[in-house]
Structures are given as structure tokens and as C-alpha cells.
Image (spheres, rainbow, N blue to C red):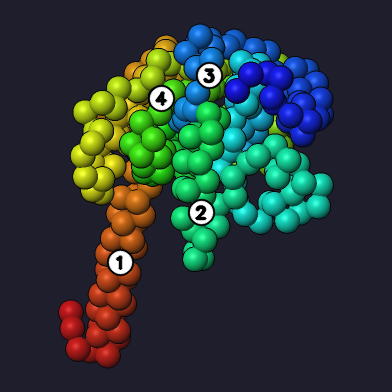
Amino acid sequence: MPRRRIGFWYRFAAVLCKPPLVVLLKRDWRGMENIPAEGGFITAVNHNSHIDPFAYAHFQYNTGRVPRFLAKSGLFNKGFIGAAMRGTGQIPVYRESSDALSAFRAAIDAVERGECVAFYPEGTLTRDPDGWPMTGKTGAARVALQTKCPVIPVAQWGANELLPPYAKKPSLLPRKTSRVLAGPPVDLDRFYDREMTPELLKEATEAIMAAVTTQLERIRGEKAPGTPYDPRSERIEQRRRTHTQTRQERTRGGRATAREEGLGT
């Protein structure tokens, strides 16, 4: 999308948001040449702070190709914020309703119109203890395989130092640096023209997340863990530990009662 088609609402949002971002964050931006100059595409971005959508949007805005984010549908009904969300062309996500697939269809339509759709494949702030990307959800892969559009992996680091995940207060000093690196398109050719099974989508998603993680390794100058943090597996393991602990406590309680009643030793 040429800069001239960015539109009033996006320019207005930039007028409001860019000055505080410039004050709060220094910039180390790389890889803008990998952002397509025209045509629809997807960016897949890691998520490690509540304010990193603004830091990333600042980077993307300066390329002339503004992102369309997928956002909770409730935000679109909140007065000025809702008007801004609609005016900037963001895509509402309706969860647990008959309209749950509308975001997927809207993302495909936006890509086919030649726009950029930004995905946070993790679906939430990373819970990895060291801030690395977690396993991803399959939405970005699904849209990419449906449209065969380029998928640009984008890593960012620095907004999380200004406002760590789940923190309530920012750490303003010393001034932090927003580091953003956009990599070359992810090679998904081997997934095209195949039945879109859950296994295929999982493999494509893993390829996308691996590319995002590689960009973050370059920013941080260190290697990520060999296996990404999987919140679903962690929840299952946590339930298992809780169940085991509960059984052990009940067993100890039963033995204590038996001793008190002279039924055991």
C-alpha cells in the first residue's frame, strides 16, 4: 500500500502515538528492505509487552505499509477507540461465537486487496521465562497457505524492557532501545497445494515461528532454547502436578487419621 493510501485515521493515530514513542524509546530498526513494496502480505511478530504493538506499528508505519491488526471485537465498540480501530482498518476477532471465523475471512480479504495483515501467532504475551517466542497458533499459516502471500518474520525487543510482561508500571530510565528486525519471507513452498490438515498447519506454523525466533536470536545475540515453550503442554503438566499433589495430601491425611484412631502405625 503506497504511503498516500495510509488514510486519515492511521495518520491521526501516528500524530498521537509517535511523539511519546520517540521520547521513550531509541530505535534500532533493520530489515525494512524485506517489507514488500506492493501486494498483500503477512507479518508474523513476537509478543513480549503490552506496548510492543505500538513499537512495532511505528516501525511498520515508517515503511509506508501500515499493518492491519487482529484485535478483540470489544475494542471496536468503545467510543473513540472503536472509531479509531474501525477507521484504521483493524480486524475484529469474535471469540466463542458464530462469527469466530469472520476474522479469518477478513484477513484473507485484506491480503487479497493488497494490504498487510499483522499476526501475533503466539496469541498472547509470551510466557517463556526468558522472553523467547512460544509455540504459535495456526491462523497466520492458514491465511498464508490460502493466499500464497509472503510471510515476513518480524522480531522485536526493547518494549518489554520499558514495560515487562504483566508489569503495571514502566521502567523509564535508562532510556530503552526498540530493536526491530524484519527477515526475508518464510519459505512455505513445500506446504502449498496440499490438503490443509491440522498436521500441515502445525508444520507451517512451526516454520513461521522458527523464522521469527531466528530474527530474535540475531537481535539478542544469543541462542533460543531448542524446544519452544508450549503453554498448552505446561497447563497439562501443571494439572498433572496438582492432581498428584492432591492425591499425596489425601493419602497423608488418611494415614494421619488412621494413626489417630489406632488403625495404623
Under mark 3, the amino acid is: Glu
Helix, strand or loop for disc 4: loop
- Choose the circle earlier in sequence order: 4 or 1: 4
At a point 62% along the width and 38% down the height, the residue shown is: 50
Q: Which residue is mark 2?
A: 102
Q: Which residue is mark 1?
A: 243
Under mark 4, the amino acid is: Pro
At a point 50% along the width and 23% down the height, the residue shown is: 39
- Choose the circle earlier in sequence order: 3 or 2: 3
Question: Alpha-carbon neighbours of circle 2 within 10 Å: few (<14), some, or many (≥20)?
Answer: some
Marks 2/4: CA distance? Answer: 22 Å
Residue 132, image x, y percentages: 42, 30
Under mark 2, the amino acid is: Ser
Under mark 1, the amino acid is: His
> Of 199 and 107, which appears nearest the observer?
107
At a point 58% along the width and 11% down the height, the residue shown is: 29
Q: Which residue is mark 4?
A: 150
Q: Which of the image's four quarters has the C terminus?
A: bottom left
Q: Which mark is residue 38?
A: 3
- Residues marked 3 and 4 touching at CB (< 8 Å): no
